[in-house]
Image: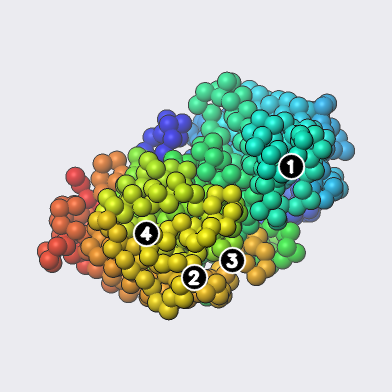
Amino acid sequence: MNWKLEKFFKASPVVWVPMWGISKLRKRAGSFAGEVPGDALWFDEWYDRAMSRDNVGKLAGLGVNMVVLPFSLGASAEAERRERDDFMRVTRYLHEFNVMSLPYLQYQNVLQEENVPGGTVWAESLTRERLGYSYWRRTACQSSKGFKDYFKSLIADAVKRGSDGIWIDNTYLYPCRCELCRADFVEYLKNNHSYLLNELYLRDFEGIEIPPNLDAVGDPVVQAFIEFNFDRNIRIQSELKEYMESLKADAVYGSNPALYRGRCSKDIGVDFYRLMKLNDIMYYENKFYPQEKNGQLSGNFHGFIAGDSLGTPGIPGAWKKEDFDAVSGKSSCGLPDAGGCEKTLLEAVVFGGITGAFWAVRAVPEQLCGKAEDQLKMYFELPEIYDTMKETLGYLKKLPVFGKRVNKAEIAVLYHRASSILKFEVHQASLHGIEELLLSSSIPYNTLFSEEMAEKISGFKLLIVPDARVLSDKEALIIGKFTENGGSVLILGQECGRYDERLKLRLDSALKELSGVSVFDKLAAPHFQACGKGAVAVMPTGNVYGEAYVNMMSAKSGTMLRPDYLENPSSVLNAVNQLLPEPEVRIAAEKKLGVSWALIEGRMVLQMLAYTESKEDARVKVYIAKGKTPADASLYRDAAPVTQIRGEPDGRYTVFEISVSRHAAMVFES
Ligand SMILES: [Zn+2]
C-alpha cells in the first residue's frame, strides 16, 4: 500500500462510498447515472438527506472511511458555488468522523453552454467529429492550456475547501486531431522517431497525416501515434498530480480510466502500467460483479491482484448485476441484493484491494418501496442491506489482513505491454481466461508486468505467458535465463513471440529454441521440454475460439472469447501441475473458491472466497508445504467465532481440514 494511504488509514480496512452520482447535474440529465432520482420532484429533499451530517454519521458508523463527494462536473466556480459549498460543509462532517473526503472532478467534459475556460481548444476525434457526452457536455482538448489551467483551479479550490486529494473520473484520453495535437505529434516524431524518416522515405515530418483510426497497428506512424497519445495522457496527469502535491504533499490521487472492460487501451490512451503507477488508488468501473455465471467466475480479482502487485490498490466499481447506468437503455434495477453486497465487500479484501459500497448512496428502487416516503431513503438504509453491511464490515474490522502486504504466489501471469497494444484481442482473451481458470481452481497467482520482468521474474517459480504474440529478443532472453535458473514456463499458444516488438513478422517464434516448438508444428497435445534447471510447456492453439467471457462491458462483438486451449481446462491444469509439482499451497475444495496467499504485516495469510450464490458450507482441505508456516493457525470465518486449528502432517505437507461458507482466512503467527 502506498505511504499516503498508510498515513491516513494505518492498518485498518479502507471502505469507500462514492456519492458523486447525486450531483445536481442530474436535474438536466435525469437519472442518467442510474438509481439517482434526478427526474423526481423530491430530488432536492433526497439530495439534502444524502448530504446531511446524519447520513455521514450513519455511513461512518458502518465503517466507511473514504467518500467521494460531488464537486465539479465542468461548470464555472460561480455556477458550481452551491455544490462546492456543500462539499466544504460535508467534508467538515466527514473529518469529524475521520473519513477521507475526495472531490469528484471530470476529465472529459465541460458544460460548454456556461463554461469555456479561456485558451480552450475543442478536442476532435480521428474521424473529425466533435467529442463529448451529449450536446451540452463537450470535451476540451486536455492538452490545451485553457483546460489544464481550469483543472488546476479546480484542484486548488478543492484543497482550499478541505479535500484530502482528488478523484478524477474518465481519465482515458481519446486520440485527438486538433491543430494543437497535430503540431505536438510532429514535434514528438522529431524528438523520438527520427529513424522513421529513412524507413518511410520521408524528407521531414511536416506533412505527416494523423491516421483516421488506430486499427492498422503495423503502420509505424500509427504505432508512433499510439505512443504519442499514451505519453500525452501521462504528461497531462503527471502535471495535475504534481500541482496537487505542491499544494498538499500527502493528497491522494485517484481516478477511473475505464479499465478491464475488454477494450484495447490503445484506443483510449491508457498506458496501463504507467497509469497504474501514477495513481495512488485505482477505480475499476466495469461489470465484473463477483458471481458465478455461465460456469465462469466473474469478479474484479483481475484488477485487485494487478493493482496490489504495483502498489496501487484497486476499488470495485461493478455495483449492479446487469448494468451500471442507463447508457445501454436498460431500466431494470440491477442494484445488488444483500448476498451481492456481501461478496463485493469481501472480494477486494481477499486480493489486496480497497473495499467499497458503490450502491450505498443511491435511490431505493420503486419495487422495494412499501410506501411513498421510502423513496426518500438511501439504498443502504434498507434493513437487509444495512444489516449485511454492518455484519460484513464488522467482520472485516476483526480480520488481521490489512496493512503491508506481499503476494506470495509462486505463479506469475505475464501482462505483456506490446502484445496488449498490437495483438490485444489474442493476448487479452488468453490473459483473462487463464486468470479465471487459476482463480476458480483455487490456485493463488500474481501478475508480472513486462515493464518489470527483468527485476521481478526471479521471484516466481512458474511464469505463464498468455498468447503474447509480440515479444522482443530481449524479453525472450529474459525468459530463457529464467528457465536456466530453474524457473518453469507455460506458453499458451505456440504463436507466442511470432512478432518482434514493432510487429515485424519473424521467420519463427522467438521462443522456438526454448520450447522446442515451431509456429508451423501441428501439435495435437501439449508439448513439454526440459530447459536448463527448469521446464517449458506449450499449449497448442488452432486459433479457434469458444464462448464469450461474461460481463465484458465494452468488448467488440466477436472478441474476448475463450481460446481453444482453455476449453479443455484439465489439460492446462495438468500442465501447471507438471511444471509446479510441489506447490507451497494446494487446496482441495467441494466448491469453487478464489484463493490468495500473502505475507501481511509479517504473518502468512491464506484467504478463500466463494463466488457462488449459495452460502452452504463446503469441506476444504488445505495443504501447506512443511516449514513454510507453523502447524497452528487462527481461523477466521464469516458468521463464526475465531478458532485455533492445528494441521496434521502428510508427507511433505501439513494438512488442515476446514469448512468454508462465504469467506475464510487462515492466519499464521510467525
Ligand atoms: Zn487536441
From the top left corner, tell me how far across and down residue 229 is, in percent.
68, 41
The amino acid pointed to by label 4 is Leu
Residue drawn at (69%, 51%) of the image:
219
Considering depth in this image, is 593 or 460 the residue closer to the camera? 460
Disc 3 vs disc 4: which is toward the camera?
4
SS label for mark 2: loop
Q: How is the image coloured?
A: rainbow
From the top left corner, tell me how far across and down residue 567 is, in percent.
47, 76
The amino acid pointed to by label 2 is Phe
Q: Residues within 10 Å of mark 2 (few under 14, many from 20)?
A: few
Mark 4–mark 1 Cα distance, whole angstroms, equals 37 Å
Q: Which disc, if any, is residue 560?
A: 3
Asked whether disc 1 touches disc 3, contact meaning CB atoms under 8 Å apart, the reply is: no
Whether residue 340 is visible: no
Mark 1–mark 3 Cα distance, whole angstroms, equals 38 Å
Mark 3–mark 4 Cα distance, whole angstroms, equals 29 Å
Tag 4 residue: 514
SS label for mark 4: helix
The amino acid pointed to by label 1 is Tyr
Q: Residues within 10 Å of mark 4 (few under 14, many from 20)?
A: many
